[in-house]
Image (cartoon, grey):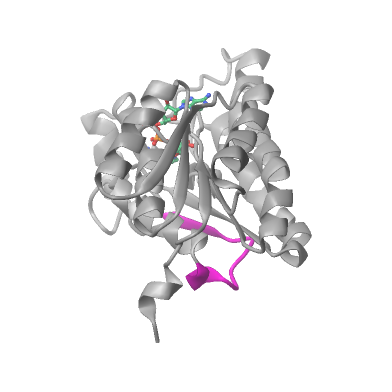
Amino acid sequence: MDINSLFDLTGKVAVVTGGGDGIGKGACEILAAAGASVVVSDLTVEKAQNTVDEIVKAGGKAAAVACNVLKEDDLTNLIDFAVKTYGTVNILVNNAGMGGGGRENPFRIDRAYVERIYAINVFAPWQLCKLAAPYMQKSGYGSIVNITSMSSINNDPSMAIYGSSKAALNHIASNLAFDYGPMGIRINNVGPGATKTHALATVLTPEIEAKMLAHTPIHRLGEVSDISGAILYFAAPVSAWVSGQVLMVNGGGVQTLD
Ligand SMILES: NC(=O)c1ccc[n+]([C@@H]2O[C@H](COP(=O)([O-])OP(=O)(O)OC[C@H]3O[C@@H](n4cnc5c(N)ncnc54)[C@H](O)[C@@H]3O)[C@@H](O)[C@H]2O)c1
């Protein structure tokens, strides 16, 4: 058995949102290391370019483009850029997301907040799936990986909107798997537990960390590399018969905030 070929993405084109930092950057790096040409997108082209520079320095192939996933034109432009630069799209990692950390006061948040969270966590991934799918079908290889969250299955205070938006994306994937399967496209989700990124640093206190670790059998917070491994698994041929699934990568526990 050739283990390397199961994870080989040579000749494949990957598109990642929010690839300038955190889990998105880890996704770009591991997909490039597996041989993919990676379109790294982030709010600014400069931010995306930092990831590209590191990939190129390590011997990989990558190109940077600005994409604010809250702007519909940017979503269209992102897929167009990938096709113009590398010829198609085979892998899409919907990583850019917002919210979480138990910061929603359910009596204070307003409609604009709810719409924003749903726009970035639900509408943008769905729209990118729709834009990328025809290229994936035509190319004969398609794999979509959405980054959701353990919050999509947990019950936590002050997380109703974030948690439900990520749960919606889980449900979108399990349903789209039926539509996309016959087109040769797989769609799966990775649900991280608390993972050490800049986003987590904005909400983490020693008290919150202690609560999380109390329910985490593998007694530590996640590293970006823990999440990247799951992303590569779903993107690569090793998971050729896996679609519509959600894999929680969270140290084995429930990691509730309460
Ligand atoms: N870190 C965690 O503990 C954790 C846990 C569960 C789920 N997640 C999910 O993982 C994903 C990435 O989170 P992270 O912790 O790596 O965040 P991060 O803040 O470290 O990185 C996010 C990246 O996305 C970019 N970004 C922000 N808004 C954007 C937008 N509108 N359009 C395009 N790019 C945008 C940022 O510039 C940044 O480069 C999110 O979907 C988040 O909900 C993270």
In this picture, is 76 found above or below 187? above
- Residue ID at (37%, 78%): 3
Q: Is residue 222 visible?
A: no
Image spot of residue 151 (x, y percent): 49, 42
Q: In the image, residue 50 lies at what x, y percent?
A: 32, 30
Residue situated furthest bottom in the rendering: 1
Instruction: Choose between 229 and 16: the one closer to the eye.
Output: 16
Q: Which is nearer the eye, 71 or 200?
A: 71
Q: Which residues are magenta?
A: 237-250
Residue 145 is left or right of residue 130, and the answer is: left
Q: Can residue 113 be seen from the camera position used here?
A: yes
Q: Say whether residue 109 is left or right of residue 24.
A: right
Q: Position of residue 238 (x, y in %)?
A: 48, 72
Quadrant of the image occupied by residue 165: top right
Magenta-colored stretch includes residue 248: yes
Vertical placement of residue 253 versus 198, above or below: below
Q: Quadrant of the N terminus?
A: bottom left
